[in-house]
Amino acid sequence: MNNNKLWGGAFEKSPTEKLLNFTSGRDVKSIDPCDQKLIPYDIATNKAHIYMLWKQKIINKSEYQAIDKELDNIFELYMNNKFKLNPNLEDVHTNIEDHLTQKLGIEIAGKVHTGRSRNDQVLSDMYLYLLANIDKYISDIKSLINTLNKKAKLYKDYVMPGFTHHQYATITTFGEVLLAYSTAFNRDLISLANIKAKFNFCPLGSVTSYGTTFAIDPSIVAKKLNFASKFQNSIDTISNRGEFEAEFTFVICNFLNHASSLSQTLILFSMPQFGFVNLADQHTTGSSIMPQKKNPDPLELIKAKAAFAHGTLVGLLSITKSSFIGYNRDVQQTKSMIMDLIEESEDIPTILTEIMSEIQVNKEKLFIEANKNFVTTTGLMELIVQNKNISMRQAKKLIESAVKISLQSNKNDKIDYISMNQAIANSSLDINISTQELDLWQDPNYQIKLIIKD
Amino acid sequence: MNNNKLWGGAFEKSPTEKLLNFTSGRDVKSIDPCDQKLIPYDIATNKAHIYMLWKQKIINKSEYQAIDKELDNIFELYMNNKFKLNPNLEDVHTNIEDHLTQKLGIEIAGKVHTGRSRNDQVLSDMYLYLLANIDKYISDIKSLINTLNKKAKLYKDYVMPGFTHHQYATITTFGEVLLAYSTAFNRDLISLANIKAKFNFCPLGSVTSYGTTFAIDPSIVAKKLNFASKFQNSIDTISNRGEFEAEFTFVICNFLNHASSLSQTLILFSMPQFGFVNLADQHTTGSSIMPQKKNPDPLELIKAKAAFAHGTLVGLLSITKSSFIGYNRDVQQTKSMIMDLIEESEDIPTILTEIMSEIQVNKEKLFIEANKNFVTTTGLMELIVQNKNISMRQAKKLIESAVKISLQSNKNDKIDYISMNQAIANSSLDINISTQELDLWQDPNYQIKLIIKD
Amino acid sequence: MNNNKLWGGAFEKSPTEKLLNFTSGRDVKSIDPCDQKLIPYDIATNKAHIYMLWKQKIINKSEYQAIDKELDNIFELYMNNKFKLNPNLEDVHTNIEDHLTQKLGIEIAGKVHTGRSRNDQVLSDMYLYLLANIDKYISDIKSLINTLNKKAKLYKDYVMPGFTHHQYATITTFGEVLLAYSTAFNRDLISLANIKAKFNFCPLGSVTSYGTTFAIDPSIVAKKLNFASKFQNSIDTISNRGEFEAEFTFVICNFLNHASSLSQTLILFSMPQFGFVNLADQHTTGSSIMPQKKNPDPLELIKAKAAFAHGTLVGLLSITKSSFIGYNRDVQQTKSMIMDLIEESEDIPTILTEIMSEIQVNKEKLFIEANKNFVTTTGLMELIVQNKNISMRQAKKLIESAVKISLQSNKNDKIDYISMNQAIANSSLDINISTQELDLWQDPNYQIKLIIKD
Amino acid sequence: MNNNKLWGGAFEKSPTEKLLNFTSGRDVKSIDPCDQKLIPYDIATNKAHIYMLWKQKIINKSEYQAIDKELDNIFELYMNNKFKLNPNLEDVHTNIEDHLTQKLGIEIAGKVHTGRSRNDQVLSDMYLYLLANIDKYISDIKSLINTLNKKAKLYKDYVMPGFTHHQYATITTFGEVLLAYSTAFNRDLISLANIKAKFNFCPLGSVTSYGTTFAIDPSIVAKKLNFASKFQNSIDTISNRGEFEAEFTFVICNFLNHASSLSQTLILFSMPQFGFVNLADQHTTGSSIMPQKKNPDPLELIKAKAAFAHGTLVGLLSITKSSFIGYNRDVQQTKSMIMDLIEESEDIPTILTEIMSEIQVNKEKLFIEANKNFVTTTGLMELIVQNKNISMRQAKKLIESAVKISLQSNKNDKIDYISMNQAIANSSLDINISTQELDLWQDPNYQIKLIIKD
């Protein structure tokens, strides 16, 4: 942090670095080569592959050990930030094989690519990368759900108007609102678990698309890499590269749709017009010229990321549509697309957790609003039905009439006793409603106890 | 069928009615109102709802029985094609309630909508509709898979060139190609099962979005309608209308991507240039002017339906993105979108099953091609590695050199003995390869036995 | 209209039929076969085609006259609603040719399809259909713009807070807000004019994709049908069917994005929290259970239609992506897609015109809000710069400090004199600001005169 | 280039660096920060802005000159690769203002941001960036069109079968095929010119969204920056950020759809099954294990880029859908999206130009195929109509019958004399066709002269 941002003079607290990074995005940030992210996974798949080659007697023990040791060396270089990809060597696979060849010669290193192709190799790297990122998402969304649930308990009795069509509908609580989102995010966890199970097969051994004459055993590789099983059909595995990416993207789309709805709801709830919640200073940003601004930028960007994710999904689905059998280079594009999406979206669960942790909810304001704009009128109608032995449709007509009369006498929040009686008189119903009943049945606190049943 | 089609004079067999319907599509076909499809489901949810109202003592037994009997009457009318939606009555819910009111009066019929809203009602109808369609898809895709697997067994030893990048790669069999698609379709079954489990909760009781003061028990309704459970959070359930539709659409997208790839592969394989397969006459259509044409229209349309499905998915995802809490009317659009997609795509599994059942595969042509264009060369390289104790990289360089030499002497299909020897001589390798070895190792039948391991 | 809608009891005015139709959508409405819409255009292209055949001496005069007369007869039948498409006859082209054959025999009617194909015929029908719909859009959007501009003049001095990030930013007027939308819609007119010019070439004569040996003259046909010119390259014309549809869809997407933004702005402005505008009763709908509801359903649906349009665009673009040269049946799907989009969206300009005509704007409330939440503070800062000879950055720091001090003393709307002075004292600046200056410079009416320059 | 690629041993020529870069893509390439691309444009907008401030007497001459000179210094640093963005300073605007402040102090540099905001500033930078890229596209597509047209002239008389539905249709020439694509690309030029005209207004002066109290003159800025005019309505300009990006993206989508279709056509035409064209060695790539492979990777990737562009379009359209009035941060996402798309696609026109320049077309093979599979049969039918005084429908039925008979006697390419006569005998037609006529009318060279009319 420094003082040179063009805004922020009126703020008490500065945004956290993660948030600043999220909001400034790629303006001043460069993006690493995609294969940078694959180095550890490519080392892992190489190690598993040569282990299998040895077990299957395709290479001998000393060859295995020599290559395996050198792969460990590469990993150590990598961990110490010393293994850099040479852009002249096309990709991570070539970089690693080239390193091995430099160290071990073509007679030995030239065996590492036996019985495989870059097609199944990169796919295996990607599967490992995707599964790891699924786990990260699962863990971060769980934290978000925990925070929402904890806060929901805290705001359990914060009675407020519920909205439909952006208009006041009936009574609810702020706790229920938060539980709505934690329930939605829970479905995203189910989906993540589903795709984790669905794509838990190791592609190595599919080779170009059609297998190999070498006596390889893909099950050994799969087990070594902790996959649930080996691939089932080599052509399917390679031809449908991009399907795992699309599935993951779809789950992210759903997650971001939920997140974008939470964002939009918080953006409105925190407008001065609402005053339902306050976002912490550090979760908003200022303006380069308007001194008073406290803008919900991170929430706005979450909405934009949802749009970005939809676009990624379209691109991914389109790439493999109508593709001819076997590997086609078109699918290479899927690599940067899914990596970009993960990079753009991976911090969102954590950011939302942080925002939700610091949010302030104005209980008093919520309650005031819960008494406005006829938000308790549907409850009143229901209570008349329950107590006055008329059908719901009869009660609705009665109440609609009462609302109309109330509005004419500028009562815009609840039905008053005079309007109620007038409406009854205008109807053919033989009932009466006391002031006490009218007051009680339009009391948000009374209604909410009947609504929240557990 | 009649003689007035503008094409078809050269055909032996006419297309089936289902296929004709699929190919002419909406040109001369009208589309029913959406709510037409919901009538039986709306009757079912009404029946379950009033049953619960009775069990919860919100209505009495005679009211329940009167309404229930009248709902049965409506169902009978519907089954006899006599219950028609009145367009002045907005939707199926109003039509049914209006019918009940006509028959039973507002005092009784006016109770049917007690403790619910059209928001949770239509959602429940839609869930039932979607779950029924998922079951239909599952059943039809299973038939398709069965057909593919049966045919795969039949074509188990139809050796052929495998393609990558649209170019000959290595040896495979036609059986393996079919298994690739049945494996992919199997993943679609997994996804269908997953969403069937994920959205197996009954929305009734969510009401507008925020529940009700009535002492309803949504679990009774859920059980009566054979859902696994009631909804979890009423706001989430209603706010996220469209999510089930989007998930189903995504699975259809994946299925159609697989189907479009199978279609594209068959389109190419049946071109005269390939001659790998013949589509049955009845699975192709003719031209209005070109007398000789036999066009794979159904397969082309399957590709277009995949594109259509992608579009539907985008629309559905976009509708709920960034939506404010609670029900918003925007989601109404999701109804016609998913229904249109189902209508456009539901016959595809059956059509593909039919096409695959009648397909003719040219074993001889496949084998001829399996001996061309160096498709056995990678296998040769692998067999040299396995037999001559050199590394895969060394072998590859050797073979690349041999290919180059072969091409120079216009040998475009396999490496000949002279080129092989020349390449060995040019290398520093100390090996030799006999004509017998060269012939055997480039024999597709020999290679395929090593490749297909199970 | 009848009394049986489940809602509406509290309304003064009922929705217009067009609006009811728009909001209930396809629930109780069926959709005609696509080719129903093409009948008049197919008659027109038939007439132009046979005229050219005669002029080119491919048919003789009496043949021309006989066919032409019978086409006129079909048109009269159509206008009297008596020409019905027979679904067994595949499409409109076959229906019309069949009718001609019934009337004139194969010797004469069998000549109508000379030198053309259904590929160029349907494309020409579609071009005419699309161009007609572009004209309708242009006309309806012009009306919308006129209404917005007229209203903008009316609300020229309705001073109000401008928003950025959903937060108060600086002063504007309601007139400027409306002009923002009319400016955006004007760009849509430019786009409509552009595609009208771009696709103003007649496809007839492209035949299957590759022309014909007949001595046709496509320019005659083009002229007869009022196209600007004939097609340029027959293969391009046929292969790229769907491109015109996609272009039109893209313009609709842009238009609906603008319309959806106007809708969202009106939805918020009409919330009780804002109270900036009132939508007329007839432009809102009620609830099936909540008696007090006045929901902005048409505006919500406009947003959904934007999403639907995005989906249509994706589908259309995807259909022709990577397509092999020449006509492919995939493109047939484009017909129902564009027709559905037009059907779903064509009333939106008119509906928005109607809504905007009846909208009520609360000038007083707008002005009250223009004095709140520091919305005049940026103007104040600018006026300090203009009058006190300090740089904008210096002024901004000063004002940020003053805002902070004001907030601490619970002044949330404008900077008060004490806070201002305190901020000056805390700074190193050598200026002073009088109460009169402070009041004047924070007066929305004063600021707006400086902002609105023309 | 080096020897360490894992493939390529059998190639005569290596891929050019541009192609290698295109095919390896982002695997080993990092992406610069977005604002890196904006530096020269931000300097330009700064220079124009302060010039206007001086002309409008908002700053004085010496202030103007001091800032202007320092901006020139920054430009020189930038050109010498010495102006690096400091990631702690959020964006290019802050970096440049900070540099000015370091050099000139807050009293002078603090005036540079007078009467503007980052909202209008970044938009102006982006407009300049987009317009420059439109020009680059225009120029590169023009080169592509020139190459196609030049080649079309060369292949003017390369007679070949035209395809519809992937099946032989009627006769065409390779020249016509190339002209189809140049015609399509010409439409893309029209679209580029259209959006260049449509978005040729300068956003500076819109400020946050609502203008300013400063006496700025946006026309001066617009003129200085060579825009056609200033913006029309400040709110519209800022609120619809992303629209220009979406329009540009849509044109790229269309261009890439055309390019993807050309790619797919070349991929098939260059398959051994076709043998119509040869791609130059340097425009294909090899395999990491299959020694014989010559894969059309660049063409495959072009197809994938089309899919990527579709996705970008969806994302961009979705971001501004249903957005509330005024600037919203969501739009920031549009910056990296359009820049990524340009980066991914900008070389495609040049790459296609290069590929088309080096392509080899097999005239002999094309002509052989033009005599196969009844591709001349439709022409024959047309010539019978023209010479034997029967209607097209009568002729079609006759020919369909003749095709059927031919097929029964294993004549699969043309109708033979015996079959023709048999068909005539079976019909009720009173015509006869001589062998000379039959031969001539099925001669591709004879037909093509009638088809290609100009």
Image (tube, coloured by chain):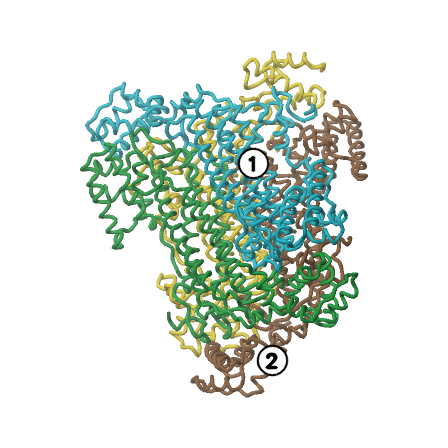
Chain colours: A cyan, B green, C yellow, D brown
Residue B428's place in the image compared with A140, above or below, is: below
Disc 1 residue type? Lys
Residue B74: x, y in percent?
A: 24, 48
x and y percentages locating residue B39 in the rendered image: 31, 48
Disc assigned to residue B95: none
Q: Is residue D64 left or right of residue A164?
A: right
Q: Where is residue C398 in the image (x, y as percent from the top left)?
A: 66, 18
The kind of secondary structure element at disc 1 is helix
Which corner quadrant of the image does residue A27 belong to? top right
In the rendered image, which residue does mark 1 sit on? A136
In percent of width and height, residue A213 lies at 61, 60
* Residue C10 appears in the picture as rendered: yes
Amino acid identity at mark 2: Asp
Task: Indicate the chain on which mark 1 is placed.
Answer: A
Quarter of the image where one finds residue A441: top left
Work out whether residue D299 or residue A54 is closer to the camera in this orientation and state it.
A54
Classify residue B135 as left or right of residue A284: left
10 Å crowding of disc 1: few (<14), some (14-19), many (20+): few
Q: Nearer the viewer, residue B2 or D9?
A: D9
Asked if the residues shown at circle 1 and circle 2 are in contact, with their CB atoms under 8 angstroms apart, the answer is no
Which chain contains the residue that carries disc 2?
D
Compute the Cα span from label 1 to label 2. 67 Å
* Residue with the mark numbered 2: D443
Quadrant containing the N terminus of chain B in the rendered view: bottom left
Closest to the camera, between mark 1 and mark 2, is 1
Q: Residue furthest left?
A: B62
> In the picture shown, does residue D323 fall above or below A15?
below
Residue D437 as seen in the image, left or right of residue C353: right
Element under disc 2: loop
Residue at the image point whose x is 48% and y is 60% from the top? B301
Instruction: Answer with left or right where residue A5 lies relative to residue D330.
Output: right
**Viewer-nearest residue: B325 or C381:** B325
